[in-house]
Amino acid sequence: GPGRATASVAIVLDPARRGVRCAVGAIAPMPLRPLEAERWIASLIDWDGERGLAPDALAAFGEYVAAACIPDHAPPADGSEAPPLSPAVLHLRRTVAALARRALGRALS
């Protein structure tokens, strides 16, 4: 059967446009881009200064990226509670969050 690829996150900083681009690979059939997370974190970066961010901002970015790429289940039409994510999916979400946090931290350093 097909093998499972390792999750990956790529970050590109664009100081000229004061933008951040993020791509998350190997969790869907094609790479995903968390556009809202990109815009949010770009608004927090001091583009004219040292480009540093507080550790809690890096962690929040990681969680934002992971939640955008691996969302919770939608609630059923009958109004009942949505089923929780499986442990494997929660692990993948934590992995993507850590990769995004680390990639942004490295890109900013």
Image (cartoon, rainbow, N blue to C red):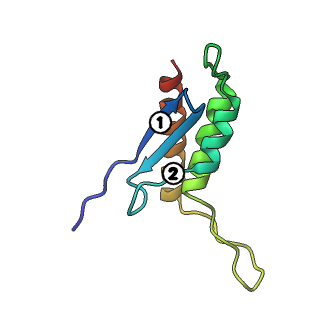
The three-letter code of the residue at mark 2 reads: Arg
User: Residue 8 placed where, x, y %?
Assistant: 40, 44
Name the residue tied to disc 2. 33
Q: Is residue 63 rendered to the left or right of residue 3?
A: right
Task: Tell me what residue is drawn at x 60 percent, y 31 percent.
Answer: 18
**Element on which disc 1 rests:** strand
Task: Tell me what residue is drawn at x 72 percent, y 84 percent.
Answer: 77
The three-letter code of the residue at mark 1 reads: Ile
Is residue 77 at least partly visible in the picture? yes
Task: Tell me what residue is drawn at x 69 percent, y 34 percent.
Answer: 43
User: Which label's residue is closer to the chain start, 1 or 2?
Assistant: 1
Task: Tell me what residue is drawn at x 21 percent, y 68 percent.
Answer: 1
Q: Is residue 45 rendered to the left or right of residue 100?
A: right
**Element on which disc 2 rests:** loop
Snapshot quadrant of residue 75: bottom right
Q: Residues within 10 Å of mark 1 (few under 14, many from 20)?
A: many
Q: Residues within 10 Å of mark 2 (few under 14, many from 20)?
A: some
Farthest residue toward the left? 1
Work out whether residue 39 or residue 58 is closer to the camera in this orientation and state it. 39
Name the residue tied to disc 1. 11
